[in-house]
Image: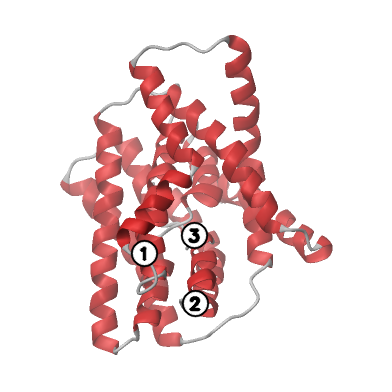
Amino acid sequence: MGVFFSAVLPTIIVFILGYLLQRTRFLDVKSISTMAIYIFLPALVFKNLYASTFDQRFIILFLFALCLLIVLIILNKIFAALFGWSKATESASMLASAFMNAGNYGAPIIYFGLGEEAFPYAIFFMVVQSLLMNSFGVYYASRGKRSIGQAVLTIFKMPATYAALFAFVFQKCQIELTESIYSMIGLLADGSIPVMMVVLGMQLASIKGLEMNWQVVSTSVILKMFISPFLAFLFVRIFSVDPLLGSVMIIISAMPTAVTTTLFAVEFDAEPDLVSTITLITTVMSVLTLTLLLNIL
């Protein structure tokens, strides 16, 4: 139970505070989320990647994220064919099971559960996941309305993409920032995690419709909460991944559905109530599954 009180409970409490705030004050979640994405998140990404040493482990992490996505897409297509799902239902399942909440939820859990040494890996994975979600995720949500090329262009609208690029260039070119600039970036970075955690609670409170299609819900929940971390475990064992990096991979893979996928589903009419249901169920389940996983690791 020590892991629950030291890592999971503090995270859940902040989520609950955001949830209660939204339920009582009815704030504009989109505005606050935009502030987090365009100001706080780029600072967090830049600070942590700028201070890290880009080595083979980051390449492994990138390849893992790509491989995990591909396998989950294939599994979703297999289930869609077996159960005769419509294209919209298949897209909803894809959004709910293939994209995890690596930022608002995953980053703080890694920080509290595995420590500062593992945090840069969580931030890097969050950036990669954001790139994949804003390309493949948008494409699957908008099939028939937007091409893969148009979806990929969404990546270049996200400031975290440029923050990661600048961090890499500055480090490789040994460009040093002045103390005042680095302190300013650090100040914003330190505020990003609590802001994103509160935003997640607010986003969960903003979920309106639920749809209990048990066949799709149970399939997506199993894929997201059990098969995904199992695939990560296999990857770590097969490729003899560094223990700390391997732990990050497994824990991140066990994260619940990203709330952002609900926004995609709403915008492109890809069964938004179904995606919202899976997001809520996986988030509640994660309190137990992450506690067990952190204790095992």
Colouring convention used in this rendered image of the protein: secondary structure
Q: What residue type is labelled 1?
A: Tyr
CA distance separating discs 1 and 3: 16 Å
The residue sitting at the left extreme is: 238
Q: Residues within 10 Å of mark 1 (few under 14, many from 20)?
A: many
Q: Which of marks 1 and 3 is in front?
A: 1
* 28 vs 42: above or below: below
Q: Name the residue under label 1.
A: 139
Q: Name the residue under label 3.
A: 258
Residue 61's disc is none
Q: Which amino acid does label 3 sit on?
A: Ala
Q: Which amino acid does label 2 sit on?
A: Asp
| Foreground of the two, 260 or 251 | 260
Q: Name the residue under label 2.
A: 269
Which residue is at a point 59% across and 31% down the rendered structure image?
189
Mark yes or no: residue 71 visible: yes
